[in-house]
Amino acid sequence: MLRSVVLIGLFALLALGSVSFATGTYVNITEPYNATVTNNGSIYLGKAGPGQTFSITISALTTNSTGAVFGRGWNKLVVTSYPKGWIVKNSALYRSTLTTDITPSPEASNGTYKLALSAVNIGNYSKIGSLSFVAYVNITPNVFRMSIAPEKVYGSPGEPKSITVTINNTGVSDSPFVINVSGIQGVQLQPETVIALHHTSETFKYAIFARTPGQYAPMVNVSSLESPLVRKSVSIKLDIKPSLLDDYYAIGQGSPIFPIIYEPSYVLMYVIGLLSKL
């Protein structure tokens, strides 16, 4: 009987030992994607452009070495080491999620950079101390892809035509993008600021037009609001031809030399063209 009790006790201790081994204090990262790191662990965040702010967010929840759950185990997330010239804003205190914002130097060269972070239990109130880990980020201007549709646009003078601009943000920054179109003679189109969140693809409409007939080759430009180095351009075709109403309107702007018998018809066509301009 005593032997059975001892064996049961040993099995219980082994079970407890396995639980302690299988659990432990950790940091649950939720942005820029879901991942879990333990003390002295590391994580690769992804790509960001020079000067583009990106964020690291963790959950405040964790456990200790015995598996006890702490809903607010982490009270602050701080960046303890980062490259010279970068800007860091550490997280607020006592939130269910903790976010730190990191802005690389606008002059940062292409390459992979190291950041040291620490999740802190303020005053060690929950007796879990702090947890340190390393994050790596690749700085490069190549953080998005773009496409335009259609690539050839037909229209009449002054008639706005919509193109579709698709931005596929492959980086970790949520920095806004600016769309503008250049290269249409006599027309200055207004830029538009849009947002394509990290790891998403978004589609936007942009209106273009030309005032005079002709064939144009405008450039559709997309750039990061925070980094002029992060930019791409695509050339499209814009074919502007006068419409029948424009022809009617033009009749009244000159003195056509035709037999007088046709003049009532010209007057009617001009009136139609004039009404189309109102």
Image (cartoon, grey):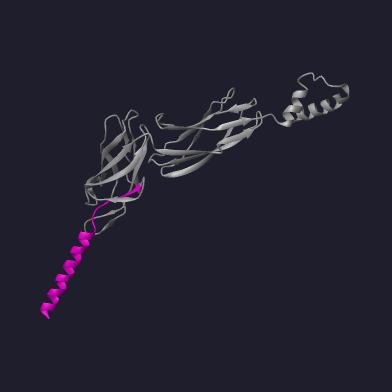
Q: What is the quadrant of residue 112 in the picture? A: top left
**Residue 264 shown left or right of residue 154 in the figure:** right
133 inside magenta stretch: no
> Which quadrant is home to the C terminus?
top right
> Which quadrant is home to the N terminus?
bottom left
Q: Which residues are magenta?
A: 1-30
x, y percentage for residue 258? 83, 21
**Residue plotted at (39% across, 38% down):** 143
Q: In terms of secondary structure, what is the magenta stretch mainly?
A: helix
x, y percentage for residue 180? 51, 30
**Number of numbered discs overlaid on the protein picture:** 0
Asked if 248 appears above or below 13 in the picture, the reply is above
10 inside magenta stretch: yes
**Residue plotted at (33% across, 33% down):** 104
Instruction: Tell which of 5 and 17 is nearer to you.
Output: 17
As drawn, the residue found furthest toward the right would be: 261
x, y percentage for residue 67? 25, 59
x, y percentage for residue 176? 45, 36
Work out whether residue 92 can be spotted: no
Instruction: Tell which of 184 and 71 is nearer to you.
Output: 184
**Residue plotted at (65% across, 31% down):** 159
Q: What is the quadrant of residue 205 in the picture? A: top right
Q: What is the quadrant of residue 255 in the picture? A: top right
As drawn, the residue found furthest toward the bottom would be: 1
**Residue 86 shown left or right of residue 208 in the figure:** left
Work out whether residue 169 can be spotted: yes
As drawn, the residue found furthest toward the left would be: 2
